[in-house]
């Protein structure tokens, strides 16, 4: 789970409910990457449980992402299905700003293997998801969506979409 997910009420009864809510959110896949949850992508910022009321704060990859409405609806439906939850509010927050370093290491591997998309984490070499070489050079900072750029692998020659 995202280590920044918090519960504002630290009583023991709330922990069970929060764990159930976190488990439900971990089952919500990102629409762009089926099999990779919004929690693994680092979108989950906070969860507040107050009895039957739950508030979920999510960090968008970028404010104009066309999938935000789908993500919010899926997250709300998942949390609403948790026993004892009657009211759910899902909101996107502007801080902190999302970055690819929020993506869980296992999700980075699956995104590369399943979707041939590289994840560019600042300060770390970005490997080609096709051949594995750390030989990607930026061709265009503009990819098919705002959170991706296009790089070319010097080793295998492939053009690679890169989450940035």
Image (tube, rainbow, N blue to C red):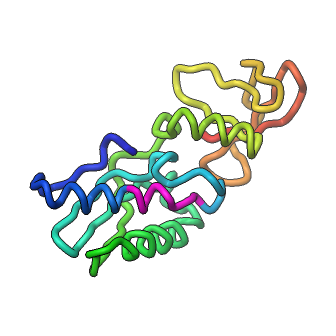
Q: Which is nearer the eye, 146 or 153?
A: 153
Q: Is residue 126 above or below residue 34?
A: above
Q: Is residue 84 above or below residue 111?
A: below
Q: Is residue 52 left or right of residue 79?
A: left
Q: Which is nearer the eye, 131 or 17?
A: 17
Q: Is residue 112 left or right of residue 69?
A: right
Q: Is residue 5 left or right of residue 123?
A: left
Q: Position of residue 144 (x, y in %)?
A: 73, 53
Q: Is residue 76 above or below residue 28?
A: below
User: Which residue appears at 60% of the width and 36% of the height?
Assistant: 108
Report if residue 42 lies within the magenta region: no
Q: Quadrant of residue 116?
A: top right
Q: Is residue 48 above or below residue 140?
A: below
User: Which residue appears at 67% of the width and 54% of the height?
Assistant: 145
Of the 4 image quadrants, the one containing the C terminus is top right
Of the 4 image quadrants, the one containing the N terminus is top left
User: Which residue appears at 50% of the width and 71% of the height?
Assistant: 74
Q: Is residue 157 left or right of residue 70?
A: right
Q: Is residue 141 visible?
A: no
Residue span colored magenta: 23-30
Q: Quadrant of residue 81?
A: bottom left
Q: Position of residue 62 (x, y in %)?
A: 51, 54
Residue at the left extreme, as displayed:
11
User: Which residue appears at 22% of the width and 74% of the height?
Assistant: 53
Q: Position of residue 75 (x, y in %)?
A: 44, 67
Q: Position of residue 52 (x, y in %)?
A: 21, 75
Q: Is residue 139 visible?
A: yes
């Amino acid at each position: 789970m995202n280590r920044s997910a918090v519960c504002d009420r630290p009583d023991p009864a709330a922990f069970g409910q929060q764990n159930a809510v976190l488990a439900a959110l971990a089952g919500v896949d990102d629409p762009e990457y089926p099999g990779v949850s919004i929690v693994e992508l680092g979108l989950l910022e906070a969860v507040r449980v107050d009895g039957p009321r739950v508030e979920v704060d999510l960090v968008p990859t970028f404010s104009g992402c066309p999938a935000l409405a789908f993500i919010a609806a899926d997250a709300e439906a998942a949390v609403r299905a948790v026993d004892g939850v009657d009211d759910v509010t899902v909101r996107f927050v502007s801080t902190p700003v999302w970055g690819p370093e929020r993506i869980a290491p296992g999700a980075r591997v699956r995104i590369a293997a399943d979707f041939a998309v590289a994840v560019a984490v600042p300060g770390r070499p970005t490997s080609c998801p096709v051949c594995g070489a750390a030989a990607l050079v930026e061709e265009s900072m503009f990819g098919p969506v705002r959170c991706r750029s296009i790089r070319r692998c010097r080793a295998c020659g492939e053009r690679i979409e890169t989450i940035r």
